Amino acid sequence: MNKFSVIIPAGGTSSRYGNTNKLLEKINDRTVIEETVSKFVDFEEITEIIIPANASIIDELKELLKDSKINIIEGGSTRQKSVYNALQVVNNDYVLIHDGARPLIRKDTIDYVLKAVLDKQAVSVMTKTTDTIKEVDSEGRIIRTIDRSKLYNTQTPQAFKTSIIKEAHEKLIEGNFTDDSSMLEYLSIPVYIVNGSYTNIKITIKSDLDFARLYI
C-alpha cells in the first residue's frame, strides 16, 4: 500500500478575516482546523499530517489536535515558507497539501486525489468557472470578456510526488507563490486536474463561516 503525508498550512494571520484567527473559530462543536483535519485522519494510507503553524497558536493546536498522526511544527513568514518547512519532515513518497481554512473538503474528493497522484505525479483539485469573466483596465473600463470554457478555479488539496514538489521548492526558495501547483507550472512541470466540489470553499471572511455552519 502506498503511503501519503498531508501538509495543512496554518501559519496565516487571518488579516482579511478580522481580529481573531479564523482557524480557531467554531463550526458548531469544532474549530475550523479540527474540522479540516478530521477529513484526513481516517484514511489508512495517510500516515502523517504535518501542520506548519503560526507560533502564536501552536500550543492551542496541540491541545486541540492530539491524534498520533499529527505533527505540529512552526511555520514560516509566508505560505510558501511554511510548506517548505513541512516538506523537510515529510516521510512518504507522496504528499497532499491542503488549506487549513477549507473545512468542507469531501472525503470522496480526497480519495480521488490519492488515486490520481499515483498516476499523474502532480494534481490539483479544481472546479470549472461558471461566472462570466471580464478583463478590466485600471480605470474600471471593461476591455473584453474572457472565454470561460478553459477557466477553472483552483482549490486544495493539491498532491505531488514528494521528490518533485521538494525540488520545486528548493529551486524557487526565494519566491512567494500562493499555491504549490503554480510553482510546477512556472517550472513547466505538468499538473493535472481533479474535479472538486463548489462547496469546498476557503474561509476568508465571516460570511464564509456562516455558510460552513449551514452546510455541515
Image: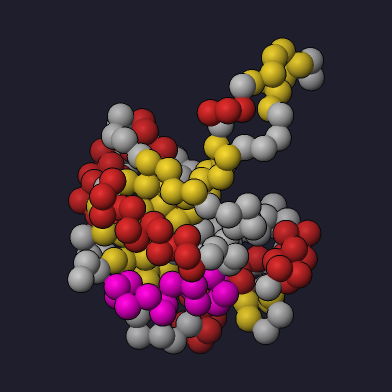
Residue 189: x and y in percent read 29, 34
Q: Residue furthest top?
A: 143
Q: Is residue 123 left or right of residue 153?
A: left
Viewer-nearest residue: 23 or 46: 46
Q: Which residues are magenta?
A: 33-47
Residue 128: x and y in percent read 58, 40
Residue 139's place in the image compared with 54, above or below, is above
Magenta region includes residue 155:
no
Residue at horizontal 34 percent and vertical 60 percent from the top: 114
Residue 83 seen anywhere in this rendered image of the structure? no
Residue at horizontal 79 percent and vertical 19 percent from the top: 140
Residue at horizontal 28 percent and vertical 46 percent from the top: 120
| Dominant secondary structure of the residues highlighted in magenta in the image | helix
Q: Is residue 94 left or right of residue 9?
A: left
Magenta region includes residue 39:
yes
User: Which quadrant: the C terminus?
Assistant: bottom right
User: Which quadrant: the N terminus?
Assistant: bottom left
Residue 23: x and y in percent read 60, 68
Viewer-nearest residue: 34 or 192: 192
Residue 23's place in the image compared with 41, above or below, is above
For residue 19, which quarter of the picture? bottom right
